[in-house]
Image (cartoon, rainbow, N blue to C red):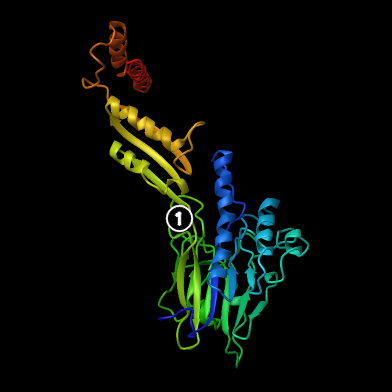
Amino acid sequence: MAQKSGTDMALTILHTADWHLGRRFSWLPAEQELRLTRARLDVVVRILDLAEHRNVDAVLVAGDIFDSPDPDDEWWRGLQAELRKRPWTRPVVLLPGNHDPLTARSVFAVDHPFRAALPSYVHVVDDDRFTLPIGDTAVVLAMPCRQHSGQSNLVSSLPERKSGDERFRIGLIHGQTFDIPGCQTNFPIERGAAIARGLDYLALGDTHGFCEVEPSAAVPTVYPGAPEAMTFGEDGTGNVALVFFPRDRRRRALVEPERVGTWTWRDLACDSLSGLRALAKDSRLRQTVLRLKVEMTVPLDEYDEAGRIIDELRGSLSASPRVGVLRENTSGLRLRVDESLKFRDDLPAVLKNAAERLKARAKDEPELAERALHQLYTLVRQSH
């Protein structure tokens, strides 16, 4: 397909999901928590900018827009303000998911102030028979989640194609497919659901990694994933899906992931000073959530250098942190206490004796003795 955005394309949509605005990270200090929570709204701005740049015909948000049905005001007001500043006519469809289900008191309820001030181009899926035409070319069919969990297959409730309806039919659903390892089958979606309902594309939300379910099937069934990861071990996050529908109806819609996320979550065990040095040189650390475990036994000078590097990564009152969010475990950083541990030859006798006593004590109280030896080393070095 040489020109996806050219005359051979009848329709282009941007499919996204799982923004989780207002997500809390209570295990972090307040400043770091706010940084990650704010990142969820920042990425929404980039998604809407991308939609404008690519001149898509519609933006579909497949659920879990908010992390709860009643988020703090600052998050729904932030999204509302971002939507209101754009003089669009292209439709944006917001689907309640299982984290932010449509209830009488939810942010999506008709009498909630979030709904009251949304621009006319934004459509909230608040009807089990929601239908939204996109010009004469396509139609969006959707059904909201009305509770946090359920066993009903929401795709099966979408209407079938009527005779003579030649529009692109796009399903918008939040739920889990049986193809995903470890899935809880919450609002389960069976294989072949898109074909069975006469759809040309099934836009899903719930799974946080980009995934095209049954990639060889005639109809794409796609999870775009969360645009920003929310925990360690989430693969395939940071994307939206751009979907191109060809004018030739015999051809399958083309789906491409587009990177929008900026944060990376890393779990790293470091067992050498060279590895720690390499980490400190990584230019991407400012946008990284790093869980660092240091496990190495090193001589005195390397122990001192390792400590300095970790302090630089962490930051201080006088220096900005090198890592965006750092959770470090340095209990495995140990000082090698053996015959190789030597101080300067001109060290005063009283300090030499102190060093020898600490080395002997390291057999019974290693952590305490190691810290004391390092402190002694630091004092001696500073006075030299």
Q: Position of residue 170 (x, y in %)?
A: 57, 78
Where's the C terminus, which quadrant?
Answer: top left
- Closer-to-camera residue (377/221): 377
Q: Where is residue 173 in the image (x, y as percent from the top left)?
A: 58, 70
Q: Determine if residue 153 is in view.
A: no
Please indicate whether residue 24 sits to the left or right of residue 85 in the image.
Answer: left
Rendered location of residue 171, percent (x, y): 57, 76
Residue occupying the far bottom of the picture: 164
Res 129 quadrant in image: bottom right
Placement of 188 over or under 167, stated as above or below: above
Q: Quarter holding the N terminus?
A: bottom left
- Looking at the image, the residue that sits furthest to the left is 339
Q: Classify 295 as above or below 52.
A: above
**Which corner quadrant of the image does residue 140 belong to?**
bottom right
**Label 1 residue SS:** loop
Position of 261 with respect to 20 (left or right) is left
